[in-house]
Amino acid sequence: MTSRDAILQAVPAVDATALRQSDLAHHLHPFTDTQALAREGGSRIITHGEGVYIWDSDGNRILDAMSGLWCTAVGYGRRELVAAAARQMQDLPYYNHFFKTTTQPAVELAQLLCELAGGGLEHVFYTNSGSEANDTIVRMVRHYWALQGQPQRRVIIGRQHGYHGSTMMAASLSGAHMHTQGGLPLPDVAHVMAPYWFGIGRLLPEAPDPHAFGLLAAQALEDKIQEMGADRVAAFIAEPIQGSGGMIIPPQSYWPAVQDICDRHGILLIADEVITGFGRTGWWFASHHYGIRPDLMTVAKGLASGYMPIAAVLVGNRVARTLLEKGGEFCHGFTTSGHPVACAVALENLRIIQREGLVANAREMGGQLAGRLAALQDHPLVGEVRSLGLLAAIELVAHKNTLAPFAEVGKVGQRCRDLCFEKGLVMRAVRDTMIMAPPLIIEPQHIDELLEKAQQVLDQTARELGVC
Ligand code: PXG
């Protein structure tokens, strides 16, 4: 019996129709229009996964080129992670780290995280989600500046198209698309443009090429700092590559210029590596690739490959020393911060990434993915393809010659996304950009399957639009 058959046998049969009805009746989904979902008959029920594949309740096998939600670095069905969780649950299913207590997995994981990150990031604060981690950072850096005798340094600068989470502060730090509900953004948050060449820079006469645009986008940060007053700005937060904003890979000129601006103004640089961390770009962290020296870093998702909810703030020496030496008690923490089972699973997950050389695999497979994507460049719907490691995007355009976007933004992307699912492939649409972030365990035959299916879906979308 293959391991897949064993899994299928172990999966209890579900009454899909009843489950879907109950889901519609009782389960409020994130970022979902329930009325529209009901019209389509409800949610697809995902029953199990193995390797790079997931299965739905109709028995369809689907290549998950999004790693769930950018999470499953080591793929689905890893027995080592199940064993690590079971062991820890047996020994100590829960304890907290509040009142002079600690647990072994939390300590070991913190040490490993600091070793992997390097660059003076030598302290770890645990949270349960990336959103909580970014909220934590804001409290931490404002406390840091108060301890430095500069309590007026409260402003955090984020970027348009940024995504830092859904809690009040994390959503405030995110781009304007996250401010339409709930009375956001909170005060003392500002935003600058994204280094998005295809979507923005290409259309600006003052930016003749990506290099010049990278410098211009960095200059927008300097301008904003001057506008706010440098002595009021606490930190700049940014994803090295903007993931859910549309896989925005900045021009090479961008990050060195941003680093220089933060250094010159003494502003803390926060790298949100929730998506880009743990090998996704072919480097342990995208900061290593770009030469970014963050003062603080947020990690989540790939940290435990999504098997457990866990995230962390990695704190550099500049901030940590002040907090430790002068800060007293940091009045912040969650009941399940550094949950021992989540830490044990994360630890084993990182050891798998190390043991199996998955960072190198991401780089190698990323090279193959880039090569295969380049062949799509001639497709009548494709305006641009771009990738770094196992992060990739295909920009769909209405007019190949002018690269003009579709009049109704997002409709074609959604259609393309739905067709992908029908063909047995998960890609995600951001506006009309198709994005992918497959598991780091991906092999050449999966890249072939991914690109064949993507090609078929693009062809069908083009046929429906009457463009080929
Ligand atoms: N930072 C980044 C860069 C993220 O991508 C968060 C923080 C927040 O993490 P939590 O664990 O609080 O969700 C994220 C999350 C999407 C999508 O559709 C992306 C995320 C979450 C939900 C949907 O691409 N990223």
Image: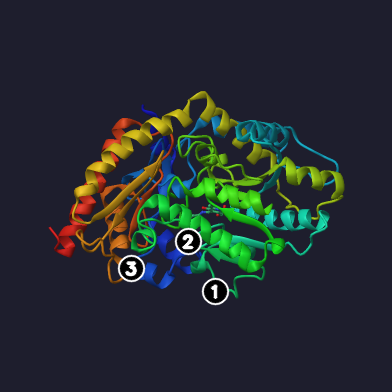
Separation of residues labelled 2 and 3 (CA atoms): 15 Å
Is 160 drawn above or below residue 238 in the view shown? below
Judge whether residue 128 can be spotted in this image: no
> Is disc 3's CB within 8 Å of ligand 1?
no
Is 256 drawn above or below residue 31 in the view shown? above
For mark 3, what is the residue? 409
At x 34%, y 47%, the residue is 386
Residue 46 is situated, as x and y percent measured from the top left of the image, at 41, 50
Separation of residues labelled 1 and 2 (CA atoms): 16 Å
Disc 1 element: loop
Q: Earlier in the sequence, mark 1 or mark 2?
A: 2
Q: Earlier in the sequence, mark 3 or mark 1?
A: 1
Checking the image for residue 161, the label placed there is: 2
Q: Earlier in the sequence, mark 2 or mark 3?
A: 2
Q: Nearer the viewer, residue 402 or 223?
A: 223
For mark 1, what is the residue? 181
Image position of 394 (left or right of 114) = left
| Residue 415 placement: quadrant | bottom left
Q: Label 3 near label 2: C-beta < 8 Å?
A: no
Residue 335 is situated, as x and y percent measured from the top left of the image, at 74, 51
Q: The N terminus is located in which quarter? A: top left
Q: How many marks?
A: 3
